[in-house]
Image (cartoon, rainbow, N blue to C red):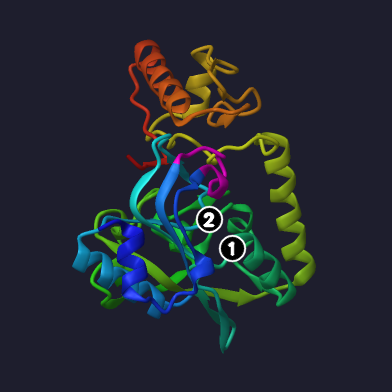
Amino acid sequence: MSIKEIIEKAKLKISKDRIFYGELMKNYTSFKIGGPAECLIKIEKKEELKEILLLANKENIPITIIGNGSNILVSDDGIRGITLIIKIEGIKYLEDGKKVIVNVGAGEKIAKLGRMFLNNQLTGFEEISGIPGSVGGAVRMNAGAHGKEMKDIVKTVTCMDYLGNEKKFNSSEMKFEYRKSILKEEKYIVTEVEIELEKGNKEKIKEKMDEYTKFRKEKQPLEYPSAGSTFKRGNDFITAKLIDEAGLKGFSIGGAEVSTKHSGFIINKGNATAKDVLELVNKVKEEVYKKFNKKIELEVEVIGK
């Protein structure tokens, strides 16, 4: 039985207009790259997520989770099984003296939260506010910018395992490290996040956000599709600097190019394929290792067949 037949037979509570077959993933990723998903489902409620996970477990169907598609490279051959886009939303505020605890659905966009926190005069999120993507994805990879990471503001994370069981982690249990958390080792899906902020001055918050926005526009190739920073920083070196010194700035394979604006970004200059990007990544890794004896690692997650 095909996945389509299995899903139609299961008579799920999920609205049919949120279930797709053969959708090109390039339409769902910031890289604008990726082949067809065998089945793509947009999840808006925890109950829907549990229902799909139980069905997938029963029928032995592989599950792939994506948020806003901003830190991934999807194979040209696409993704087998069921791909879930987590769009669970909702924002609740709880004041606790000077602190404000905000309960946020995993599908909420970071940029939207930045605007809301500004309007509510909440500080502590300014550095994070320009990161593309959703809260769930940012927590999973402990995203960060300008010296601040998600671990610095996350109080608790509510997750679901692949059998539909709910579990809540506190910040220390999340085992946050540089671009890493327990969720990269164990199979859990973020559904809600508690963020701890403080009351602040709206003008000062806006000033900081404007400063970071200006920095990104000047230093990052925002005018081209990409998955954000392609490589992790090194323990004792700046990766983009080594790529630059290796003479790779502007080097391209197919439609993929090492950005001339920031060597740490590989961009989709025009109709790039995942194959183009991966060949370019390997070329960059080889040249940097050859010239500086340094191994660089991908920050972008590669998924699919």
Q: Is residue 161 visible?
A: no
State which tag comes first along the sequence, 1 or 2.
2
Majority SS type along the magenta span? loop
Looking at the image, is 260 positioned above or below residue 79? above
Q: Residue at x 29, y 59 (%)?
A: 182
Q: Residue at x 32, y 71 (%)?
A: 9
Q: Nearer the viewer, mark 1 or mark 2?
A: 2
- The segment highlighted magenta reads 26-35
Residue 34 magenta: yes
Rounded to the nearest angstrom, the CA distance separating label 1 from label 2 is 8 Å
- Tag shown at residue 68: 2
Quarter in which the N terminus is drawn: bottom left
Image: 28 above or below 87: above
Task: Using the image, tell me which numbered label, if any, was put on residue 109.
Answer: 1
> Quick one: 142 or 106, which is closer to the camera?
106
Total marks drawn? 2
* 114 relative to 281, above or below: below
Helix or strand or loop: what does disc 2 sit on?
loop
- Residue 138 in view (yes/no): yes
Residues tagged 1 and 2 counted as in contact (Cβ below 8 A): yes
Q: Position of residue 241 (x, y in %)?
A: 52, 24
Mark 2 nearby-residue class (10 Å; few <14, some 14–19, many ≥20): many
Residue nearer the viewer, 182 or 22 = 22
Residue 237 image position (x, y, % from top left) = 43, 29
Residue visible at 32% across and 39% down?
A: 305
Question: Element at badge 1?
Answer: loop
Residue 105 % position (x, y): 50, 74
Q: Which mark is residue 98?
A: none
Q: Is residue 20 left or right of residue 221?
A: left
| Residue 150 image point, x, y percent | 47, 60
Disc 1 residue crowd, few under 14, some 14–19, many 20+, Cα 10 Å: many
Q: Nearer the viewer, residue 133 or 45?
A: 45
